[in-house]
Amino acid sequence: MLTIYGVYRSRASRILWLAGELGIPFKHVPVIQLYRLADPAAAKGVLHTKSAEFLKLNPNGHIPSIDDDGLVLHESLAINLYLAKKHGGPLAPANLAEEGQMMMWALWAATEVEPHSLTVLNHRVAREPSERDPKLAQAAIEALRAPFAVLDKELAASTNVVGGRFTVADINTAEVVRYAMAAPELFEAAPRVKAWLARCHARPAFKAMWAKREAEPA
Ligand SMILES: N[C@@H](CCC(=O)N[C@@H](CS)C(=O)NCC(=O)O)C(=O)O
């Protein structure tokens, strides 16, 4: 049995979206980020990222993690590549070349995009207005222009990032690119990225995941 640890309002959303696409059964344990608890001192009984019980599964103290019949993994993008390959079908790599491309896009998303897209999210919308720094947001937007142009060019040649069909590589890339949505100017300059992300977000499994995310306390 697969257990997915992490609230929907976290990078666990990537795994929960993929699990929905695959249609696989899983147990969900809503471990929450410690920093989101209003009074960490009163966090007794709430399973959070620094709970001793959870640290046994993920010594980083971060969500998500999975336990798949005893195989414990952290790192959201790697978890998705593993689950897609395990369960097969159109979301998974059809051959070694596709597997290489899927790894390439996952590492590209994690290193070239995510640090900047998270800064855009935090400093444009997620943090309290008094804690936002518009200069940091702007620098991150400038840093994202080149990788957005790379993805836009890729999507000019194909409807999806790998194999001309919707795969786990779209989920991994789309979830990282989503954090930059607070900067619409990036998407106006990359219309194919904008259209591709809209297609990803129109998928029933994404919508089902998103509805559960919205139902969680902010
Ligand atoms: N590279 C990790 C990052 C995990 C991560 O930083 N998760 C955040 C939530 S999205 C977290 O657990 N933060 C809690 C904390 O820093 O205490 C992954 O992709 O799984």
Image (cartoon, rainbow, N blue to C red):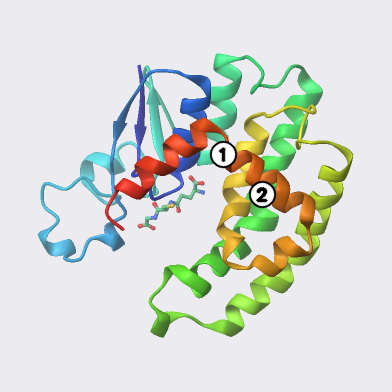
Q: Amino acid at mark 2?
A: Ala
> Residue 8: percent from the left, percent from the top?
37, 44
Question: Which numbered dot is residue 109?
Answer: 2
Q: Secondary structure at mark 2?
A: helix
Judged left or right of residue 143, residue 29 is left
Quick check: can you spot residue 156?
A: yes
Which residue in the structure is indicated by mark 1? 77
> Which image quadrant: the C terminus?
bottom left
> Which image quadrant: the N terminus?
top left
Q: Residues within 10 Å of mark 1 (few under 14, many from 20)?
A: many
Q: Residues within 10 Å of mark 2 (few under 14, many from 20)?
A: many
In front here: 22 or 118? Answer: 22
| Mark 1 or mark 2, earlier in chain | 1
The answer to whether marks 1 and 2 mark residues whose Cβ atoms lie closer than 8 Å is: yes
Q: Is residue 159 above or below residue 182?
A: above
* Residue depicted at 66% across the width and 37% down the height: 170
Q: Amino acid at mark 1?
A: Leu
Q: Is residue 198 above or below residue 95?
A: below
The image quadrant of residue 181 is: bottom right
> Residue 167: percent from the left, percent from the top?
66, 29
The image quadrant of residue 66 is: top left
In front here: 192 or 167? Answer: 192
In front here: 120 or 48? Answer: 120
Is the CB–ligand 1 distance for label 1 below 8 Å? yes
Q: Secondary structure at mark 1?
A: helix
* Residue depicted at 41% across the width and 49% down the height: 10
> Residue 179: percent from the left, percent from the top?
56, 58
